[in-house]
Image: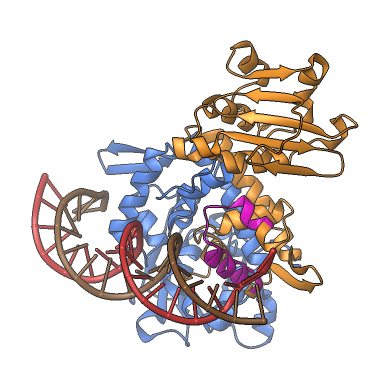
Chain colours: A orange, B blue, C red, D brown
Amino acid sequence: MSSYGQLCPVAKAAELLDQRWMLLVVRELVAGSTRFNEIHRGVPQMSRTLLSRRLSQLRQHDVVSRQETPDGPVYQLTDAGEELRPVVEALGTWGVRWLRSLAEEDRDPAFLVWDMSRNVNTDALPDHKTVLALTFPDATVSLRHWWLILSRAEVDICDEDPGLDTDVHLTAPLRVFVPVWRGDLPWHEAVVGGELELQGAGPLVRAVPRWFRLGHFAAIPRP
Amino acid sequence: MSSYGQLCPVAKAAELLDQRWMLLVVRELVAGSTRFNEIHRGVPQMSRTLLSRRLSQLRQHDVVSRQETPDGPVYQLTDAGEELRPVVEALGTWGVRWLRSLAEEDRDPAFLVWDMSRNVNTDALPDHKTVLALTFPDATVSLRHWWLILSRAEVDICDEDPGLDTDVHLTAPLRVFVPVWRGDLPWHEAVVGGELELQGAGPLVRAVPRWFRLGHFAAIPRP
DNA sequence: CAGGATCCGATTAGATACTG
DNA sequence: CAGTATCTAATCGGATCCTG
């Protein structure tokens, strides 16, 4: 956290926030994660050691508070932290508008599914527990198959067959589904193009697109 | 510029922007600097080598364009770059509200005077060329004395006596003047407290505060 | 689950010298 | 003025192992 030696508020803010992973940790907190492992699920490629350091730094600057509870520590944004929301929003808005090209390694299925799980439109779900199987044919074998167990109470992610009946099976290459999730490609266009397939009972299949809100920045207009 | 391996727009934007000095370079461009050395004057502690690298990266991502002119190369924000303004604004707004404590080394007189020079309210200046001498008693000897030569056409900075008649002499420790410039301490309060002194003809002295707009984020309300 | 301590390797920033 | 090339030194992040 070496200093820039400048009095400018941008410099002082950057000193804290431009450190590696820092903005993504803040993104997770802004998104509502509070537990250490919950935050880490949003930044799985970050080492836990570093996450710990970053959280300490945020606490030192009164951006985050930490409270011990019977269930373990809970991290929460302070008033100062809450006001970082516009920063993250501005950054994401800019990113989705102007940084369109994604490298292969950016299409991490683990993050994608985790992001899906926290953008479930619980109101639109069927009354009963529903199992949505996901297959990304172009992903590494170990990251190719996922299951989302959806109910109004909670959403579970499995990376191995949970042994439940699958209600709907979604198959699409990451090359297609990631742009859909980011809002670069309309859902129906991917379906018509034949690259996004849905199998299951008709009414359920038609309802699937409403089960999710898509990624946070999908609705941002593009240049 | 190693990748975060995430599809999230915040992550993609951070990959580019969270690199050391990057946001401050963007700040300079947003502030209107276009020439290499002009940009560097805003980030004097950054090595020119690194500034060169950062500008290349910004060009690679179509944030900045570079045009050869008879006077030399000119850097300008593209449409994408122009849209980084909200990011810098959000960051600075947050910084000035929540990061109040400045270390000694953050009160760099060189940056301060440079920032003053580009926040001159030319409309409020006297008709004739005016020399404002600045003394920061608590600064290192070599950074203690400055002169601003103010006219409606241009503003010049000198770090040694230009040999012109001084119209107004401002004396204040950085410990006081930097908070004034950041908007943490009202100008008149510093004067009343006796720590900000102005010497010169009465009408000129009274006009000085109107010659500057103060730092860009000085007017942001504080929590 | 939630980390702290340590060590090592990769990155990368800075200094220096050089070019047109 | 406006950079580039190269080398080195310091930093930082990740992996590993450990704790309660």
Residue at image position (37%, 67%) is B45
Left or right relative to B116: residue A117: right
Q: Check the picture and name the quadrant holding the C terminus of chain B.
A: bottom right
Confirm whether the magenta stretch covers residue A47.
yes
Q: Quadrant of residue A120?
A: top right
Report the span colored magenta.
Answer: A38-59
Residue drawn at 50 percent across, 33 percent down = A139
Where A21 sits versus B162, above or below?
Answer: above
The verdict on residue A196 being magenta is: no
Give me the residue at 72% from left, 58% from top: A83
- Residue at position x 80%, y 21% from top? A204
- Relative horizontal placement of residue A110, taking residue B40 as reference (left or right): right
User: Residue A144, image x and y in percent?
Assistant: 55, 33
Prevailing secondary structure of the magenta residues = helix
Specify whether residue B198 is in view: no
Q: Which residue lies furthest to the right in this view?
A: A127
Q: In this view, does A218 lie above or below B192?
A: above
Q: Nearer the viewer, residue A171 or B18?
A: A171
Q: Position of residue A190 (x, y in %)?
A: 61, 17
Q: In the image, is residue A135 above or below residue A10?
A: above
- Quarter holding residue A187: top right
Q: Which of A101 and A165 is in front in this view?
A: A165
* Residue D15, position as x, y percentages in the image: 43, 62
